[in-house]
Image: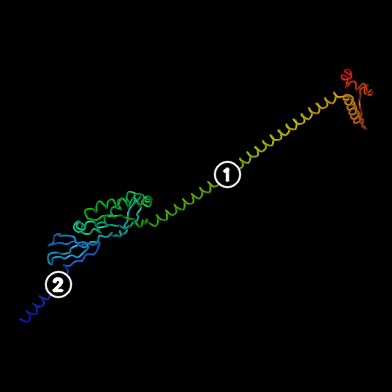
């Protein structure tokens, strides 16, 4: 009987020694950077251990909670949301947060990861319910900022700050995707037709402008041509008039010289005879005055005034 008791006591003391050694081992804590440990003394919050070497009082102090102070990324699982126009879409995202107050994160809520994830999902469903399907694709940043605003207010008592939230996927039903693709194709075809019509319109306008410019240039050229021709004719008439005047002036001067009148008479007589010869061609009938045969009387008729003066 005593042997059994001795064995029992040996086992008891051996176990107590192991337990005591374990407590001594657990009383020494080395905390890494960007991590912290919440220490409770007799079940009550005592202090927060940050990076470094720390010693706890065995059997009195206990390391109850461990937290990382790094920024954490939490995957928000896909969920079904109903838009304002009654379209079901599946949305998921990713959440970035950081523990600012380890004490609040330990005692303010049981599991801040789960709480934040649930809050994101409920907030997302509420926001998507106020938007049409097309709006959800166009206003991702607005949705992210609204969710972040709600989370920032709710997570403050938990000692957690939500830095940002990003929507990863927005997946409408397959039928809606096919309808959107058909609509997109129709819009592309419409834009193509509009572009072609605008191109044809611009081409017609350019051609008409070219024809207009060509007509204007032709009319300007014709106008300038007529002006140049008129100026040429005027110059020619002026030159002829000047030459004629000069010739008359020279003739008048020649008449005033000695023998000038006789030379004029001779020239007129020669011209008269030449013209009469042209009239006397074969097959031509002429009716002449009776005194035409008297050349002297004809010359007197032509130069009568000059003969009287002489």
Location of residue 88 in the rendering, given as x and y in whole percent from the top left corner: 34, 54
Q: How many marks?
A: 2
Q: If you read the primary sequence from the N terminus, does the residue marked by circle 1 or circle 2 appear first?
A: 2
User: 177 or 240: which is nearer to us?
Assistant: 240
Could you give the CA–CA distance between mark 1 and mark 2, rounded to whole angstroms? 98 Å
Residue that badge 2 annotates? 21
User: 148 or 221: which is nearer to us?
Assistant: 221
The image quarter in which residue 51 lies: bottom left
Residue that extends furthest to the right in the rendered view of this protein: 293
User: As displayed, is residue 34 above or below residue 297?
Assistant: below
Residue that badge 1 annotates? 206
Q: Residue at x 51, y 48 (%)?
A: 195
Q: Residue at x 49, y 49 (%)?
A: 191
Q: Kindly check if marks 1 and 2 are in contact, taking CB atoms under 8 A apart as contact.
A: no
Q: Residue at x 14, y 72 (%)?
A: 21
Mark 2: secondary structure: helix
Side of 109 where 221 appears, left or right = right
User: 291 or 237: which is nearer to us?
Assistant: 237
């Amino acid at each position: 009987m005593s042997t059994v008791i001795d064995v029992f006591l040996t086992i008891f003391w051996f176990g107590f020694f192991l337990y005591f050694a374990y407590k001594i081992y657990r009383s020494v804590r080395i905390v890494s950077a960007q991590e912290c440990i919440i220490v409770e003394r007799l079940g009550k919050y005592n202090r927060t251990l940050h990076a470094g070497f720390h010693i706890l009082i065995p059997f009195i102090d206990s390391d109850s909670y461990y937290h990382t102070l790094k920024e954490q990324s939490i995957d928000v699982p896909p969920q079904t949301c109903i838009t304002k126009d009654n379209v079901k879409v599946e949305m998921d995202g990713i959440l970035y947060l950081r523990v600012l107050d380890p004490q609040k994160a330990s005692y303010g809520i049981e599991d801040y990861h789960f709480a934040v994830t649930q809050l994101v999902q409920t907030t997302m469903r509420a926001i998507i319910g106020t938007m049409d399907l097309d709006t959800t694709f166009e206003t991702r940043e607005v949705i992210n900022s609204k969710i972040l605003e709600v989370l920032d207010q709710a997570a403050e008592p938990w000692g957690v700050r939500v830095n940002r939230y990003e929507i990863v996927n927005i997946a409408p039903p397959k039928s809606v995707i096919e309808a959107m693709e058909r609509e997109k194709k129709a819009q592309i075809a419409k834009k193509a037709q509009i572009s072609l019509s605008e191109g044809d319109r611009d081409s017609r306008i350019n051609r008409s402008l070219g024809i207009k410019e060509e007509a204007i240039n032709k009319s300007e050229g014709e106008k300038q041509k007529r002006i140049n021709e008129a100026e040429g004719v005027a110059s020619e008439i002026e030159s002829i008039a000047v030459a004629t005047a000069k010739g008359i002036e020279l003739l008048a001067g020649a008449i005033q010289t000695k023998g000038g009148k006789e030379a004029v008479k001779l020239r007129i007589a020669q011209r008269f005879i030449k013209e009469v010869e042209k009239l006397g061609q074969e097959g031509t009938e002429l009716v002449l005055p009776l005194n035409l045969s008297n050349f002297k009387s004809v010359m007197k008729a032509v130069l009568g005034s000059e003969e009287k003066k002489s």
